Amino acid sequence: MNISYTKKGDYLLPNLILKDKEQYNIGKYGLLRLQYIKRYKLGLYFDLLVNDTLNEYLHDIDVTVMEKVQSLIKELAEKENINEKLKQDNQILWVSKMNNIKNIAEEIILKEYIYV
């Protein structure tokens, strides 16, 4: 990859041309990953930025993590026997248990996909 530069005052600025490609909306998990790489993985962040792949990368992370969280919630709910019958019999208990499972699932998945 050959990058040309333009001199502005004392600085050489790269002449970057972005390709016209689809831009994705980034959700919660993509934004969490963005914050993490900006703070702790600056090399990766700048590489993705310069190669114009940041948006696609964050979108892929967002979709992957969302799917994994949903899958893990379903799996944990089945293990804990949290089902539609419990939902009908005691909605407050069902909501409480489902919120707890969601928090557990997110914590597990965030450690595996976001904060690495």
Image (cartoon, rainbow, N blue to C red):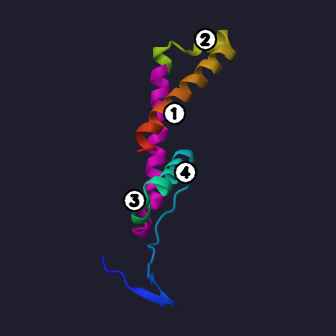
How many angstroms separate mark 2 from mark 4 (CA)? 34 Å
Labelled disc at residue 31 = 4
User: In the rendered structure, which amino acid carries the disc numbered 1?
Assistant: Glu
Q: Nearer the viewer, mark 3 or mark 2?
A: 3
Q: Is residue 74 found inside the magenta-colored segment of the image? A: yes
- SS class, disc 3: helix
Residue 73 among magenta residues: yes
Range shown magenta = 48-76
In the rendered image, which residue does mark 1 sit on?
A: 106
* Amino acid carrying mark 2 in the image: Leu
Residue at 45% from the left image edge and 15% from the top image edge: 79
Earlier in the chain: of badge 3 and badge 4, it is 4
* Residue at mark 3: 44
Which residue is at the front of the view, 83 or 96? 96
Q: CA distance from mark 4 to mark 1?
A: 14 Å
**Which residue is the site of mark 2?**
86
Q: Residue at x 49, y 50 (%)?
A: 36
The structure residue drawn at horizontal position 47% and vertical position 38%, both measured from the top left corner, is 110
Q: Quadrant of the C terminus?
A: top left
